[in-house]
Amino acid sequence: MTDASPPPRTAREFVQDGRRLIVSCDACRHAQFLDSETLTLTFGEDFDVIAHIAEVKAQLYCPACGAGRPDLLLWQPVAGEPAVVHRLTGTKAG
């Protein structure tokens, strides 16, 4: 049976759900997990990461080469299977 609970949206929910964000750079191909504590300290634990993904991307840079606005991937663990990774896209609403 699948879990019918909604996917995490806030920094706190990401931590509670065990999901993480991956910073992925197109320029140098470097990828690494974004520390959940950093996400929470930067934006606050009630910050809606999904609704404001463009704002999150604007604050990030590649830790390897310094390129700005890296892609964000959502890493989702799946019991007994390889983790699922989703590319998060977003543009600033205007």
Image: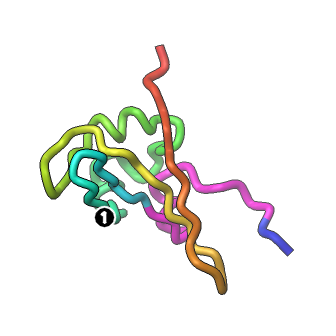
Image location (x, y in percent) of residue 2:
81, 70
Q: Nearer the viewer, residue 39 or 23?
A: 23
The answer to which of 26 and 18 lies nearer the viewer is: 26
Residue 24 vs residue 27, the one in the foreground: 27
Q: Which residue is rendered at x = 45% and y = 44% of the image?
A: 47
Please tell me whether mark 1 sits on a helix, a strand or a loop.
Answer: strand
Q: Nearer the viewer, residue 85 or 15?
A: 85
| Residue drawn at 30 percent across, 46 percent down | 26
Q: Position of residue 46 (x, y in %)?
A: 47, 48
In this rendering, the answer to whether 28 lies above or below 58 is below
Q: Dot 1 surroundings within 10 Å: few (below 14), some, or many (20 or more)?
A: some
Residue under numbered circle 1: 32
Task: Name the residue: 56% across, 66% down.
Answer: 76
Q: On the rendered image, what quadrant is the N terminus found in?
A: bottom right
**Residue 47 relative to residue 30: left or right:** right
Image location of residue 57, percent across then percent down: 34, 39
Place of residue 28 in the rendered image (x, y in percent of width and height, measured from the top left): 21, 52
Q: Is residue 5 left or right of residue 48?
A: right
Count of residue discs = 1
The residue stretch that appears in magenta: 4-20
Q: Quadrant of residue 41?
A: bottom left
Q: Assess whether residue 31 is covered by the magenta stretch.
A: no
Place residue 40 in its image quadrant: bottom left
The kind of residue on which mark 1 rests is: Gln
Q: Is residue 12 magenta?
A: yes
In this view, which residue lies farthest toward the top? Answer: 94
